[in-house]
Amino acid sequence: MAIEWSRQEVLRAVRTCLLRAGAVTDGCSAVDVVAEPDSMLVIFRWRRDPNTYAIKVEFPTAPESSWTGLPVTSVDEWAADVAARLAEELDTGLIRRSRRMIRDGYIVLDTHNAPDVCPAGFFISSVPLDDVVLSPVSPPRGFWKRAYFTFSLGSQSASVSPLVSEAGYWLAKAGMDVTIPRQLIVEAKLACWLQVCVDNARGRPVVGHAAASWEDK
């Protein structure tokens, strides 16, 4: 079934939908939506990343959602599904996993055939911190990310709270130094803490970990 919406109507609906504050997902700030010969380019900023990103969105050729493939009854409904699809992509790591190219000052992300970020035979996941209170959740104003990679033997810190002293205990048991990420938790500077393990049914052994913090610039 052919669509009844003109490209101008589609562009207007997508702009109206995406350019509202908080329209997509936390951390995404839409800058503009511009028309190209065969598509639209959604331009946005992501969290504290200084880069400006863009993602191509094809103009519809049928009254169907580009996210679910289901029929839609209006151009506004179609635009809302564009926002939902973008939210899903961003919330599942699009910035990190996407292929990219630089064009006109933007980093254009390609959602197709995104490479696997895990090295063959290994699996990357967050270090669980369910029992550790992290405050504040958002990084302090004026802080930048600094990464630490620790794969060597080391001692545990004695200057952390009982809960924090258990964080990543299996990493410490495997002989890895968890002093820095635990201290970052205490200082409310921890941005993320990742671990790498052998990709098998047990998720063991753990072979490395990395922590990133927010630091005064």
Image (tube, grey):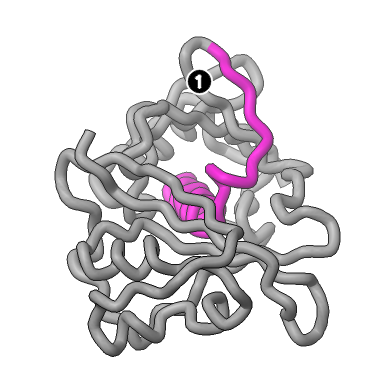
What amino acid does circle 1 point to? Ala
In this view, the residue in front, 207 or 91, is: 207
- Indicate the position of residue 105 as horizontal and vertical percent values: 47, 13
* Above-or-below relation of 133 to 144: below
Name the residue located 53 percent from the left edge and 36 percent from the top edge.
5
Q: Is residue 164 magenta?
A: no
In this view, the residue in front, 93 or 16, is: 93
The quadrant of the picture occupied by the C terminus is top left
Q: Is residue 82 visible?
A: yes
- Please state if 214 lies on the left or on the right of 62 as rendered: left
User: In the rendered structure, which segment of residues is drawn in magenta?
Assistant: 75-103
Q: How many marks?
A: 1
Q: Is residue 88 visible?
A: no
* Above-or-below relation of 189 to 9: below
Quadrant of res 60 = top right
* Above-or-below relation of 54 to 97: above
Q: Residues within 10 Å of mark 1 (few under 14, many from 20)?
A: some
Q: Is residue 95 magenta?
A: yes
Name the residue located 52 percent from the left edge and 77 percent from the top edge.
172
Numbered disc 1: secondary structure: strand
Name the residue located 79 percent from the left edge and 72 percent from the top edge.
199
In this view, the residue in front, 9 or 143, is: 143
- Please state if 109 lies on the left or on the right of 190 as rendered: right
Q: What residue did someone put label 1 on?
A: 35
Name the residue located 51 percent from the left edge and 49 percent from the top edge.
86
- Indicate the position of residue 9 as horizontal and vertical percent values: 44, 31
- Indicate the position of residue 91 as horizontal and vertical percent values: 49, 58
- Indicate the position of residue 8 as horizontal and vertical percent values: 46, 25
